Image (spheres, grey):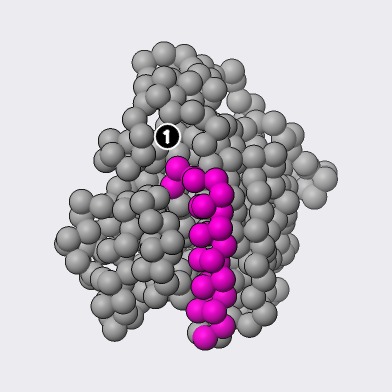
């Protein structure tokens, strides 16, 4: 049930445009030089090394950095560690390690990051400062904004403290005031901020879903060495392993499918806090293997080796925008995913992938069997999914939206 991608002409802004064309269109529109710089802060200890360097947070960081670079912008990246994938001729790395992530150490470390921001801002006068929300950094938002002076502060929020602990509401209420724009990765996250923190942030928020770099999947040929000479149907999950993903439902559904189709196997690629518990479960199930983490740059090759990719979710992470799903779609492989509002918006009503209700292993098994029994359907869904992410969900398009918002709000020169 594989596929080869046809040549696709992408229509954007009413015509056939390359990424460089899009960038030029934007620059001509707002009169901005593409040689500007941005400060990009990752105030999260062990950001890249957690979970073996896999997960949506890595894909998101890569997408933002690479997207700005492709559009001609330079970035000063401030973090406690790095990965080769975010290093290019447009990035300047400022790595400030932190030994232990205790509360006090994080505040001292965070103040060091802010002093660095001040030096960079005075030297290069960046267009704006972009930071990822971190609970441990919220108390320092005021200090960050003070050193930025009139440089806009853009805050990316994937999740936030108050949605887990109500007592953090007043900290979030105070801290979010200092952001000029709040980027929520889904409409669900936006609503949660308005309900749990304050409605007053509505005017600051823009909803900007995650994206994908389709070039990674088009340029890298599949590596079939792992599955050499295997003829069985291959189901796959690739990403971070944590309890928020309902792997028990996936294992139950797999067992149901295997009763009808014994030429099927299931592979997990990834690492995370749930690794040991998942391994204990899968070791006793025929045809299921836990392969461990895969370097980010090799993930396209792995995903292209599967026949069906599964995105299991639980109510705990139903609010997020699934970076993993964008990559599944870019791989051109049929997808079955737990239905959440962001997933349904991305896949449609079984138009670009098949959905199943969260927690419903029976329906998940039926959807898997439906694809196995109807390869033509899988091919059709995969083609539509690929076209969707290629046309509408590149990181460059996401970044152009940010730049346009900053311009329209008068935060950067138009």
In the rendered image, residue 274, in percent from the top left (x then y), is placed at 59, 75
Taking 105 as reference, is 51 above or below it?
A: above
Taking 230 as reference, is 383 above or below it?
A: above
Taking 119 as reference, is 29 above or below it?
A: above
Residue 118, can we see it? yes
- Quadrant assignment, res 305: top right
Residue at image mark 1: 400
In the rendered image, residue 337, in percent from the top left (x then y), is placed at 45, 52
**Foreground pick, 7 / 193:** 193
Which segment is the magenta one?
A: 104-128
Kindly identify the residue that appears in the image at 30 percent across and 48 percent down: 206
Magenta stretch prevailing secondary structure: helix
Residue 11 on the magenta span: no
**Foreground pick, 206 / 269:** 206
In the rendered image, residue 258, in percent from the top left (x then y), is placed at 60, 58
Residue 242, can we see it? no
Residue 117 on the magenta span: yes
Kindly identify the residue that appears in the image at 28 percent across and 35 percent down: 408
The crowd level at tag 1 (other Cα within 10 Å; few <14, some 14-19, many 20+) is some
Taking 155 as reference, is 392 above or below it?
A: above
In the rendered image, residue 309, in percent from the top left (x then y), is placed at 56, 49
**Foreground pick, 4 / 133:** 133
Quarter of the figure that contains the N terminus: top right
Quarter of the figure that contains the C terminus: top left
């Amino acid at each position: 049930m594989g596929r080869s991608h046809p040549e696709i002409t992408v229509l954007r802004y009413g015509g056939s445009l390359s990424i460089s064309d899009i960038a030029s269109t934007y620059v001509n529109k707002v009169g901005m030089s593409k040689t500007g710089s941005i400060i990009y802060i990752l105030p999260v200890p062990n950001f890249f090394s957690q979970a073996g360097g896999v997960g949506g947070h890595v894909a998101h960081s890569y997408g933002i950095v690479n997207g700005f670079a492709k559009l001609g912008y330079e970035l000063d990246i401030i973090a406690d560690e790095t990965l080769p994938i975010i290093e290019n001729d447009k990035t300047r790395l400022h790595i400030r390690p932190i030994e232990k992530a205790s509360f006090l150490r994080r505040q001292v470390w965070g103040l060091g990051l802010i002093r660095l921001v001040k030096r960079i801002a005075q030297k290069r006068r960046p267009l704006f400062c972009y930071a990822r929300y971190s609970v441990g950094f919220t108390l320092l938002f005021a200090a960050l904004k003070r050193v930025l002076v009139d440089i806009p502060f853009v805050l990316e929020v994937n999740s936030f403290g108050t949605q887990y602990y109500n007592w953090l509401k007043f900290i979030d209420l105070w801290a979010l005031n200092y952001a000029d724009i709040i980027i929520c990765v889904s409409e669900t996250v936006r609503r949660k901020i308005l309900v749990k923190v304050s409605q007053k942030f509505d005017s600051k928020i823009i909803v900007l879903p995650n994206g994908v770099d389709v070039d990674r999947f088009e340029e890298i040929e599949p590596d079939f060495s792992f599955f050499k000479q295997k003829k069985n149907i291959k189901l796959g999950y690739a990403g971070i392993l944590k309890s928020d993903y309902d792997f028990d439902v996936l294992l139950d559904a797999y067992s149901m499918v295997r009763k009808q189709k014994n030429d099927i196997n299931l592979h997990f690629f990834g690492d995370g806090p749930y690794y040991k518990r998942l391994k204990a479960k899968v070791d006793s199930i025929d045809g299921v293997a836990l392969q461990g983490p895969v370097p980010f740059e090799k993930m396209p090759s792995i995903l292209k080796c599967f026949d069906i990719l599964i995105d299991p979710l639980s109510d705990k992470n139903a609010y997020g925008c699934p970076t993993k799903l964008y990559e599944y779609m870019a791989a051109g492989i049929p997808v079955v995913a737990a239905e959440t509002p962001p997933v349904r918006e991305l896949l449609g009503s079984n138009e670009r992938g098949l959905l199943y209700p969260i927690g419903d292993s029976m329906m998940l098994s039926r959807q898997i069997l439906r694809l196995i029994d109807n390869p033509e359907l899988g091919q059709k869904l995969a083609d539509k999914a690929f076209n969707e992410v290629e046309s509408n969900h590149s990181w460059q398009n996401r970044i152009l939206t940010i730049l346009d918002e900053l311009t329209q709000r008068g935060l950067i020169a138009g």
